């Protein structure tokens, strides 16, 4: 499964509520670092398939969700465990750094 897209509050609730581990990328289409992060997320999504669901949320289209998590810069990554946010970070990171972030989040 590739990256899931959060296109409504209902989709957000379905994805985060029905999977034990979810990584949500809050991004914007005009954001350069967000575009650079996309292939990294695709790769991580493939490597962690069946374990971690990777989802993206466009902050311009889903302002309510972005505001709920106080997203102030993009990209912002939030890791959810059992529907609760456990760790967040902002900015571009390479695959190695992203895997370390996910591992740290899983240990919380």
Image: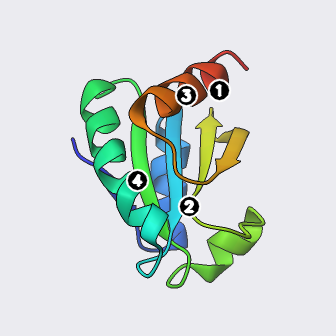
**Residue tagged by mark 4?**
37
Q: How many neighbours does mark 3 have within 10 angstroms: few (below 14), some (14-19), or many (20 or more)? A: many
Q: Is residue 98 left or right of residue 44?
A: right
Which of the labelled discs sits on residue 75, or is there none? 2
Gap between marks 1 and 2, in whole Å? 17 Å
Gap between marks 3 and 2, in whole Å? 15 Å
Gap between marks 2 and 4, in whole Å? 8 Å
**What's the residue at 73%, 20% (across, down)?**
108
* Marks 2 and 4 in Cβ contact (< 8 Å): yes
Gap between marks 3 and 4, in whole Å? 15 Å
In front of the other: 20 or 1 = 1
| SS category of the residue bearing label 4 | helix
Image spot of residue 51 (x, y percent): 38, 23
Display coloring: rainbow
Of callouts 4 and 1, the N-terminal one: 4
**Residue tagged by mark 1?**
105
Of callouts 3 and 4, the N-terminal one: 4
**Residue tagged by mark 3?**
102
């Amino acid at each position: 499964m590739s990256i899931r897209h959060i296109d409504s509050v209902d989709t957000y609730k379905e994805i985060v509520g029905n999977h034990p581990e979810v990584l949500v990328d809050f991004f914007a289409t005009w954001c350069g670092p967000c575009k650079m992060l996309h292939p990294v997320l695709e790769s991580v999504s493939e490597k962690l398939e069946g374990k971690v669901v990777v989802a993206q949320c466009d902050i311009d289209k889903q302002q309510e969700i972005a505001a709920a998590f106080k997203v102030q810069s993009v990209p912002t990554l939030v890791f959810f465990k059992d529907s609760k946010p456990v760790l967040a970070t902002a900015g571009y990171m390479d695959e190695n750094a992203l895997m370390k972030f996910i591992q740290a989040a899983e240990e919380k």
